[in-house]
Image (cartoon, rainbow, N blue to C red):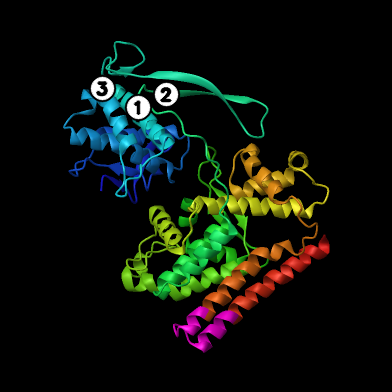
Amino acid sequence: MPVKRLKDFEIWDFYSPLEQRLMFVDASDTPFITWPNGMPCFEANMYMKRQIHRSKSRRVKGGTLNTYAHNIIHLVQFCFDNKIRFSQLTDDLFTFFVHGLQGERDRVGELMRSNNHVIAIVRQCLDFLLFVQDCHDLNNFIGQGKENVIRVFYKVHKINIEGSPNKKEVTSLYHKAMPTKDAVKRRLPVSSDDALKVWNYINTEDNQEIMLRNRIVYQLLEQLGGRVTEIQMLTVNDIKAAIKQGEKPSLQLTTLKRRDHQEKRSVPVTTTLLSSINQYIRRVRNKVIKRTIGKKDDHGYLLVAISTGKHLDTKTISIYMNRWKKSAGVTGDLHPHLFRHAFITNKLKEIILKHKEINSADDFRKHLLNTERFKMELQQWTGHTQLYSLDIYINLVFADLAGYSETYNAIYLNDAVKVMRQTIEQLKFQVSRNNISLTESMLLIEESLDAFDSDIQSALGVLKVE
């Protein structure tokens, strides 16, 4: 494969005069790029290393580097196919490369990429070629002047930032071959109907271990609102730590896409959800680890591949989601990040409906600006750095609440009820197919009911105080 993810990989960060040694940073999951013949691509891998240092963060895990790698791999492939070095590219050849990206079609004749996707790839490749010029100390290879073999230009423009009265000035890199932008398509949260279709399909899986693992993947996306990589990075110890908290537990998520050093955030979860996850750990995960890689080599991650016991990666989760979408007959957009959108809008809805004095989006923004606790609560749930990033969700919520009933009881039970219903339906299905004994199903129901009862008592306590 042209792009691999490095495991257990470290790079040096700085030299410590006090300790008189190099200090290293964990760079696991850094993409390693090769030519199609398997030989390492020196320039591409050096570019990846520079992107790590550009990130202004000690933490480099996440999907961003992988996106960079899969953008420039198109140019790596192009140069390999045409038997040329990066430094031998010309303006005409680069134009030919861009047109190839635009015109490529899949097996049924559909265009493989939107214009916006092509623009993203081209910009990354241009940035990479600027690095190649510096790396090899080339003269007049790529730049704005006529003397350059590849000519680029920059545009300075201002963009609106939701929730802020000020516009942000942005400088973008362009090439004459770049297509015009597509109309911006706003992504809405996953609909409840589509989510239900996917859930029902997951529960028809014949392999019980795969089915139970996929149920947990779905519930984690639905109940935590995390980015897919944040969900993928959960460990068994994270679950154990949450269970030990007792009433009103919260789960620690690794927060990605932050430029500060806040790497963790707490997301409130129901005891019922933790009980469902714990059943998966006992009934599936631990058994898979034991028969595949052995307890001694247990990596500790929650989500595992059933056949190998290896840590389930984000790409596989996205592939599963696409497969579920097609098999469940979902025609609209459906991918892991839409569950995050749905989670945020639902949480905002809970806050809004608890406060009768909030009647509009503007009222809610003022409420947030004047109430530090709510700002911190929202940003803790979602992992957003800036409050204005939530504006799109605020608008969606108020559009959804138009004409909504004022009554809103026991909001803390919503998630618990949903997970409990999912658990009961799944167990009924397993019993009907003789995949589980009636005795075992009753024990699991009793365990889930105990967790559900804990959520009920917790919610009632909250409502009495209010």
Provide the residue designation for mark 1: 126
Vertical side of 283 occupied by 132: above or below = above
* Circle 2/circle 3 CB separation < 8 Å: no
Please state which of residues 438 and 384 is positioned toward the viewer in this rendering.
438
Please state which of residues 113 and 426 is positioned toward the viewer in this rendering.
113
- Span of residues in magenta: 429-445
Residue 205, horizontal then vertical, whole percent: 42, 72
Sort mark 3 into few (<14), some (14-19) or many (20+) by Cα contacts within 10 Å: few
Q: Secondary structure under badge 3?
A: helix
Provide the residue designation for mark 3: 92
Which of disc 3 and disc 2 is earlier in sequence? Answer: 3
Q: Can residue 102 be seen in this view?
A: yes
Residue 222, horizontal then vertical, whole percent: 56, 59
Among all residues in the image, which is located at the extreme front? 109
Please state which of residues 153 and 99 is positioned toward the viewer in this rendering.
99
Residue 437 magenta: yes
* Circle 2/circle 1 CB separation < 8 Å: yes
Residue at 42% over, 75% down: 208
Sort mark 1 into few (<14), some (14-19) or many (20+) by Cα contacts within 10 Å: many
Quadrant of the image occupied by residue 413? bottom right
Residue at 38% over, 38% down: 68
Q: Hey, what amino acid is under mark 2?
A: Leu
| Magenta stretch: dominant secondary structure | helix
Residue 129 magenta: no
Provide the residue designation for mark 2: 173
Residue at 77% over, 60% down: 408
Q: Secondary structure under badge 2?
A: strand
Vertical side of 353 occupied by 366: above or below = above
Residue 390, horizontal then vertical, whole percent: 63, 42
Q: Hey, what amino acid is under mark 3?
A: Asp
